[in-house]
Amino acid sequence: MYTWFFPTVLVFLIFFCPQTFSQQVNKHELSTIERYFPIPTRTQLNWQDAEMVMFLHYGDVAEVWFDGANGEGPNGKTQKYDWDLYYSTVRRLQPNALIAISGPDIRWIGNENGLANETEWCVQPKTSSFQAASENGMVWYPSECDVSIRPGWFYHSSQDQRIKPVEILTDIYLKSVGMNSNLLLNVPPNKEGLISRFDIRGLKEWRRNLNKIFARNIFKGAHIDCSNFRNNSKEFLAANCLDNNRKTFWTTDKNITSAELNISLRKKENINIIWLEEAIEYGQRIKSFEIYSDNNRSMEKIFEGTTIGRSRIITFNKVNTDRIKIVIKDSFASPILRTIKGCYNETGM
């Protein structure tokens, strides 16, 4: 279950709370959001009681979203929130739930278009006492991109023909998941509490398109070598990046923070996508990299980037080549790559 909270409104309760719960609303001094969603604030109903209903009767909750919207009252005052109470309640009742946005586990990317940043670090300065920081005060605080499949966040039958087309959804995927962020796609239930058939059709088309694009890994079975691998051990070979095994990876000797990896194909292939992944259980490390393609025995730069992280999906104009070189220019520590994939999207990017 995914639960979305505005600070003053439990949006999820619109669909699941007993009628008697919502009937207890005091109509006075409601925030902007509460005027549209008649759910009691903590001053009208104990917040923890509301959380008990949510967190004990609807199974496991994966994420709790505390939105950054802050309703202003008619007196111009903005509400203050007891974040420590909110966080501790979530931790106690749903210990595996991630607390997002105005929370210690996941941060908002900064827009509602589903687009991440070209440079995207999961490591950020500590902002909450609920975050376990390293000695330098940094914490693991990955981003999340939010966007709706429709023009707005809530269901309107007038928008049934305005579902985002598969091309736009695919572009959002490449610019969120493909840029080291998480993607939260809003799909609002209709008045019957169900997902509209129009939304379902759009989601299915999107999934089919992604499956088609990434169906074939052109680098599977290719030869790969590198300028350095740790201790000359098979445990850290560059070939681990091509074995489709999430338990293996390539890395360099300690204190070696730059390296090259060369991929040789059996024949020339069309390529316009390269997918890279760091083994982020060891941290996000790589600061800058370049990708080259062999163009008639001359290596031509086709991409230059900064961060990689959990996944970096790089798109570029089609090249027809039998050799790709990846250059790790700089890294905070020995670079660690788990995955290198090559793909070709026939429809272009």
Image: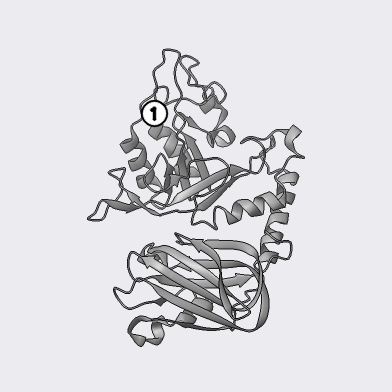
Q: Residue at 32% of width from left, 84% of height from top?
A: 231
Q: Residue at 54% of width from left, 37% of height from top?
A: 12
Find residue 272 and report its horizontal and vertical position in percent. 64, 66
Q: How is the image coloured?
A: one colour
Q: Viewer-proximal residue, 320 or 347?
A: 320
Determine whether 319 is above or below 196 in the image.
below
Determine whether 240 is above or below 37 in the image.
below
Q: Viewer-proximal residue, 101 or 262?
A: 262
Find residue 328 and report its horizontal and vertical position in percent. 43, 70
Find residue 31 and report its horizontal and vertical position in percent. 48, 21
Instruction: Give the position of the C terminus as an image quadrant.
Output: bottom right
- Few, some or many residues within 10 Å of mark 1 (<14, 14–19, 20+): few
The three-letter code of the residue at mark 1 reads: Asn
Q: Residue at 51% of width from left, 49% of height from top?
A: 116
Residue bearing the label numbered 1: 46
Point out the residue furthest to the right here: 161
Residue 248 in view (yes/no): no
Residue 90 in view (yes/no): yes
- Element at badge 1? loop
Residue 209 falls in image quadrant? bottom right
Q: Residue at 68% of width from left, 65% of height from top?
A: 213
